[in-house]
Amino acid sequence: IDDFMLEKTVSQWIWIRMTEQYCSVFKLFIQSTDVIAKELSTYTTQNFKRFLWDNLVKRNWSSSTYNSYRKYLRCYCEFLKNEGYLSENPFDNIQKRKVAIQLPKTLTKSEIQELFKKLPSAFNMSTYVWKRNETIVYTYLYTGLRLSELLNLKIKDLEIHEWYIKVTKWKWNKDRVVPLSQTLTKILAHYMLVRNKSFDINWDSPLFPTGYWKFLQKRDMNTMIKKLRSHVNFYFTWHQLRHTYATELVRNNFDIYNISRILGHSRIDTTKIYLSVDTERLKNQLDSITLFS
C-alpha cells in the first residue's frame, strides 16, 4: 500500500483530495475480515464482493460510495498485477452498481435576491471580514468555483485587468481560466482596495485570508454559511451556488462545451445534466408551439 501511494502521489501527481480518499479506503480495507490486506491469497473476486457487500449493508452505502470503493481498490489491485504480485485483477469481474441520476439543486431567482439582500445583516458591515465574506459569496455565485478551489486562490491568480481568475492545478491537476463578469470584476476591485488596507501585498498570499493572513479552512466556511442560513428563509449549501451558476449559463444559451471548460469538468456528460435543470426554457419552448392541432 505504501508503494502504491508513493507511485500515485509522486509519479502520477494525483490531486491532494484524491490522496485523502485513498487513505480513507485503505483504512477501512485494512480492517476487513473478508480480505486480509497482508495476505495476497485472499485477494479473490469472491472475497472482494463480500467486502463491498458487507459494507454496503452495514454502513448503508449509496451506490456512488460503493462504486468509489470499487474504483480505488480496483486501481490498487491493478498496481499489484503490474508489479507481479497478482496474476489477474479480481475486480475485472465485479461490476459497478447503477446510480440514480439526481438533478442538481439550485437557488431560485427570488432566493438569490434574498441572499444578496441579507448579506449586510449577516455580518458586521464595518469590518474587513464582512467585505471578505460578501465577496466570497459573489465570487462563488459568479464563477462556479469548487469550494477547495476558492479557498486556495492567491492574489496572483486574480487578473482583474484581464477579466479572469486562474485556477492552478487543483482538481485533475489541470489549470483553467475562469472569466469574470463586469459585475464581479467591480466587486473584486473594491474588495482588493479594502483588503490591501488591512494586509501587505504578497502575490503568494491568499486572496481571501483569515485575520491572521492564513488560508481559510472549511470550518471557517461552515461558520460563515451557518450565519447566512440563519438570516434567510431557505436552506442552501456552498455547492448549490456552483450549480446555480452553471444553470444560469445554460439559461442564457451558453455553449455547453464552454460551460464545461469554465466549471473544470473532465467529461462533457457531467455538464450536460444542467440541461435538464433549465425547466423555464423548456416551458417557454412548449408554450411557443401548438400541440395536437
Image (cartoon, rainbow, N blue to C red):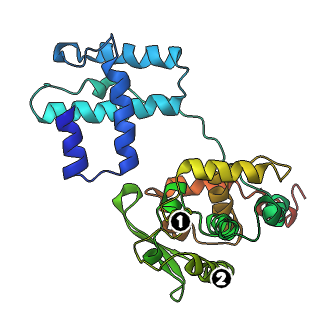
Tell me the amino acid under the disc marked 1. Pro
Number of numbered discs visible in the structure rendering: 2
**Which residue is label 1 attached to?**
209
Tell me the amino acid under the disc marked 2. His
Residue found at x 53% / y 71%: 258
Residue found at x 53% / y 89%: 161
Q: Is residue 256 left or right of residue 233?
A: left
Residue found at x 49% / y 55%: 148
Viewer-side residue, 259 vs 151: 151
**Where residue 190 is drawn, which disc sits there?**
2
Q: Is residue 208 left or right of residue 44?
A: right
Marks 2 and 1: which is nearer the front?
1
Image location of residue 284, percent across then percent down: 83, 64
Kindly state the secondary structure of the residue where label 1 is placed: loop
Query: What distance separates the C-alpha of mark 2 from that of mark 1?
Result: 16 Å
Residue found at x 77% / y 49%: 229
List the single residue furthest toward the bottom: 161
Which comes before the other along the chain, label 2 or label 1?
A: 2
> Which quadrant: the C terminus?
bottom right
